[in-house]
Image (cartoon, rainbow, N blue to C red):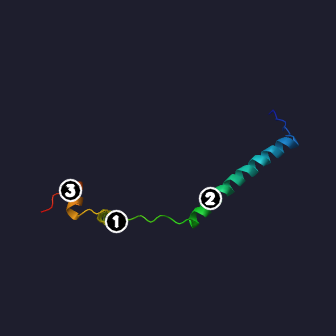
Amino acid sequence: MEETKKRIRRSVEERAAELDKKIQAHKDAIKALEEKKAELFRPKKRRRSDAELAKELFSKAKKAGMSSREIAEKLGLELE
């Protein structure tokens, strides 16, 4: 005949500890979801296009007192 295993009863403290682990796991999941939700409301930095960056660099160089020829020389370009 088959041997039947007796069911081992866990103590109340063991069951409570297991429930505490589950509760903590759910709290961690809730915290992660709240962080994702907060991320939705944070403003994102706008990515600038290459043309916008070039225009900004050129205008800053002009403000620094550089001429178009000086900018070209710094970049290693030859203007005719």
Residue sitting nearer the eye, 49 or 30: 49
Q: Quadrant of the C terminus?
A: bottom left
The percent position of residue 69, horizontal first and vertical second, equals 19, 62
Residue, disc 2: 35
Q: Nearer the viewer, mark 3 or mark 1?
A: 3
**x%, y% of residue 55?**
31, 67
- The secondary structure type at the circle numbered 1 is helix
Contact check, label 2 and label 1, Cβ < 8 Å: no
The amino acid type of the residue labelled 1 equals Glu
Give me the residue at 75% from left, 51% from top: 23
Q: Which residue is mark 3?
A: 73
The numbered mark at residue 10 is: none
- Kind of element beneath mark 3: helix
Q: Residues within 10 Å of mark 1 (few under 14, many from 20)?
A: few
Q: Nearer the viewer, residue 79 or 65?
A: 65
The answer to whether the residue labelled 2 contacts the one labelled 3, judged by CB atoms less than 8 Å apart, is no
